[in-house]
Image: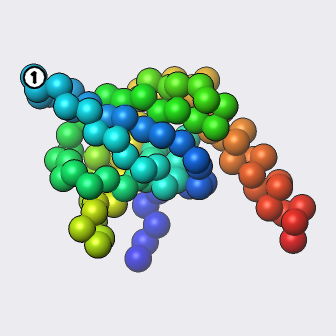
Amino acid sequence: MRERRRGNRTDLDAQLILKRLDNSRIHEVYVEVTNVSPTGIGFMCSEDLEMGSVYAGTLTIWTKEQIPVFVDIVRCREMDGRFNYGGLFVGMPDLYSRKISVYQTVEETKSKSYE
């Protein structure tokens, strides 16, 4: 399968809460973040989210900082009664993208030093 990701994904212990933007009903969805890159995010969720929809959310990163994000759902796969999603960040400010890049660099350096 051809890799279509724009950036390397890194495992990240983070929390993400999403709300659909184009729906008048306010419904928060808590998801389990599986990986993140400066351009996108992978996560698991028990709810069926609509492909091509944009969700507003708050991503809590390793520093406990809360980052406001907009996620465009671009991939969905059902696995064991749950859904595995891939999303692209929409309008992510450079400051937050750089923080994710720095985290990736630190994690890569740590893993190389343990080899």
| Residue 58 drawn at (x, y percent) | 42, 28
Q: Is residue 57 left or right of residue 51?
A: right
**Does the image show residue 63?**
yes
**Does the image show residue 97?**
no
Residue tagged 1: 24
Identify the residue at image location x=69%, y=47%. Answer: 104
Give the colour scheme of this rendering.
rainbow
The amino acid sitting under disc 1 is Ser
Q: Quadrant of the N terminus?
A: bottom left
Identify the residue at image location x=17%, y=25%. Answer: 26
* Image-quadrant location for residue 102: top right
* Image-quadrant location for residue 8: bottom right
Density class for disc 1 (Cα within 10 Å; few <14, some 14-19, many ≥20) is few
| Residue 53 drawn at (x, y percent) | 20, 40
Q: Is residue 86 left or right of residue 36?
A: left
Identify the residue at image location x=52%, y=32%. Answer: 60
The front one of 4 and 100 is: 100
54 in relation to 81, above or below: above
| Residue 95 drawn at (x, y percent) | 61, 23
- Identify the element where label 1 is drawn: loop
Identify the residue at image location x=70%, y=42%. Answer: 103
